Image (cartoon, rainbow, N blue to C red):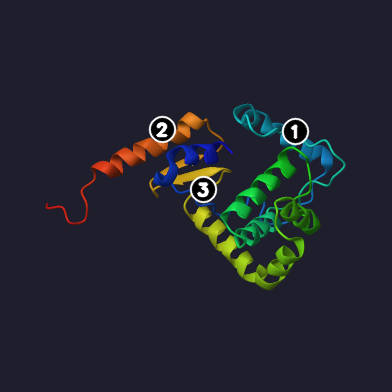
Amino acid sequence: MRLEQVVEEYGDDVELIWRSFMLRPEPEERSAEKFAEYTRSWERPASMEPTVTFRTWSTDNAPPSHSMPSAVAGKVAARFGPERYRAFHRRAMEAYFTENRTISDRSVLLDLAEEAGIDREAFDQRWQEEGEALLAEVVAEHNEAVGAGINAVPSLVVGEKYLVAGAVDVADYRRVIDTYRSETATEPGPDAGS
């Protein structure tokens, strides 16, 4: 949410493109106790995020088994336009970090799509029709990120030059974007003489 806030501040000068990276690409069953312990690591990023509440896993819902279903669902949501994608993305984040819902469960993801203003049946149909291609897209983006040395979520790549890995303060995002913008503003264009 902080990153989207920064992008809004820059307006048309900055474009945010979400790409898939899966911390857990393969299904991995974890006990609720172990997962609750893992979610204690959310406390630091939670202290930096004023618009979203983070809650250590404390429900009877099963922990998500892997990242693939939610990554594919995000691609499906994007097919309904950027506004619906942003609404879906925000609902998925809230469902996971605040409501402790199992976002690897297809029925939960269909609920989230509906809560984000996407027709549930249309979303499900699109997923059935395009799921294999979207899965391939998610895997390709994940592999590209791994090949580029990305190993954290979130990771921000600015101008294919700077990598900001992990949860950082808004000022850190601004600093990297401003650095890149100042460098590219002073670089000679392709027609400049030597």
Q: Indicate left or right for 33 with 149 as reference.
A: right
* Res. 75 image quadrant: bottom right
Circle 2: element type: helix
Do labels 3 and 2 touch, CB within 8 Å?
no
Q: Which residue is mark 2?
A: 175
Q: Nearer the viewer, residue 5 or 109?
A: 5
Q: Residue at x 62, y 66 (%)?
A: 134
Give the answer, above or below, for where 23 lies relative to 127.
above
Q: Which residue is mark 3?
A: 150
Give the answer, above or below, for where 163 lies relative to 139.
above
Do labels 2 and 1 touch, CB within 8 Å?
no
Do labels 1 and 3 touch, CB within 8 Å?
no
Name which residue type carries label 1.
Arg
Q: Is residue 10 visible?
A: yes
Give the answer, above or below, for where 23 lies relative to 47.
below
Q: Can you tell which of label 3 and label 2 is closer to the viewer?
A: 2
Name which residue type carries label 3.
Ile
Q: Residue furthest left?
A: 194
Q: Which residue is mark 1?
A: 55
Q: Residue furthest bottom?
A: 129
* Res. 41 image quadrant: top right
Circle 1: element type: loop
